Image (cartoon, rainbow, N blue to C red):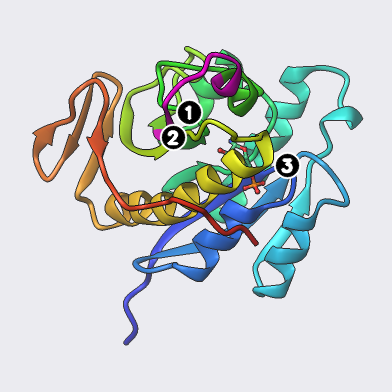
């Protein structure tokens, strides 16, 4: 008898390169479904190519955020996931959704949180002449980009960096990091309750784990 893998659902909204990394490096978890809030995005093609059920819940088709989120909750239930993984999902999940979603939610954000919450992180990092930038994986709470951080990876910022160069380096770190964290959760090494996040039984610090790997140049698919 084959062991059933830990079921997850991935929410996307665009290119889906993180989804691709999660597909290519899947171990211990299984992506049961992919849901996009945007139709016609490449992430949906990536899911279909991998034989994963993919659907669109277009936020523009709903009269309110609540109605959109209700549709999301109903669809999610059909996949019975134990973890929800946000990967480029560009809608803020409101307290309505968060109060009703029965499973933990992970997100990946392109900055060293708590610095640079929100959008356009690469441009802001360059404008501020930062020497380092990076990526954070965190649990989602009602505080935007403010839930407990699980892990971060730092990347260097060079003097002549452009958004394009820097984002390639950050994407390479994202693709390396995210599948590992999802795997930790599937393996029950990473545990979440609203006031306590532990890895291998020890509480995580405010910055989570710092994992390091060299992302000097970076490659993106
Ligand atoms: C990534 O930069 C991720 O950190 C952010 O949205 C982007 C999604 O990119 N949350 P992709 O769709 O996975 O290529």
Quarter that holds the N terminus: bottom left
Task: Look at 47% across and 12% down and name the residue there.
Answer: 143
Q: Which residue is mark 1?
A: 111
Give the numbered dot on residue 134.
2
Residue 102, label in figure: none
Gap in angstroms between the C-alphas marked 3 and 2: 21 Å
Residue 218: x percent and y percent? 52, 54
Task: Check contact, mark 2 vs mark 1: CB within 8 A.
Answer: yes
Magenta stretch encompasses residue 127: yes
Q: Earlier in the sequence, mark 2 or mark 1?
A: 1
Q: Bounds of the magenta span? A: 125-137
Q: Position of residue 31 (x, y in %)?
A: 53, 61
SS of the residue under disc 1: loop
In the image, residue 172 above or below residue 139:
below
Out of 181 and 67, give the one closest to the viewer.
Answer: 181
| Direction from residue 40 to residue 197 in the image, left or right | left
Q: Is mark 1 within 8 Å of ligand 1?
A: no
Q: Is 94 one of the magenta-colored residues?
A: no
Mark 2 → mark 1, Cα distance in angstroms: 5 Å
Q: Residue under label 3, please give it.
A: 13
Q: Quadrant of ligand 1?
A: top right
Q: Residue 57 falls in which quadrant of the image?
A: top right
**For the residue carrying disc 1, how many other residues have a C-alpha within 10 Å: few (<14), some (14-19), or many (20+)?**
many
Tell me the distance, in whole angstroms, between the alpha carbons under discs 1 and 3: 19 Å
Q: Is residue 118 left or right of residue 99?
A: right
Question: Does the rendering let one see residue 100?
Answer: yes
Label 3 Cα crowd, 10 Å radius (few <14 / some 14-19 / many 20+) = many
């Amino acid at each position: 008898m084959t062991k059933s893998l830990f079921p997850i659902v991935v929410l996307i909204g665009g290119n889906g390169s993180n989804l691709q990394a999660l597909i290519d490096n899947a171990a211990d978890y299984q992506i049961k479904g992919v849901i996009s809030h945007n139709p016609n995005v490449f992430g949906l093609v990536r899911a279909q190519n991998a034989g994963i059920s993919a659907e669109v819940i277009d936020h523009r088709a709903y009269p309110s955020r609540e109605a959109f989120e209700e549709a999301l909750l109903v669809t999610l239930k059909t996949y019975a996931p134990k973890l929800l993984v946000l990967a480029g999902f560009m809608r803020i999940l409101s307290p309505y959704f968060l109060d009703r979603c029965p499973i933990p939610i992970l997100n990946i954000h392109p900055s060293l949180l708590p610095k640079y919450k929100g959008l356009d992180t690469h441009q802001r990092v360059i404008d501020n002449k930062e020497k380092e930038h990076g990526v954070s994986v965190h649990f989602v709470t009602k505080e935007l980009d403010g839930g407990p951080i699980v892990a971060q990876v730092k990347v260097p910022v060079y003097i002549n960096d452009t958004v394009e160069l820097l984002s390639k380096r950050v994407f390479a770190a994202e693709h390396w990091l995210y599948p590992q964290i999802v795997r930790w959760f599937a393996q029950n090494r990473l545990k979440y309750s609203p006031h306590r996040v532990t890895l291998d039984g020890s509480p995580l610090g405010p910055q989570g784990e710092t994992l390091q790997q060299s992302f000097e140049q970076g490659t993106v698919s």
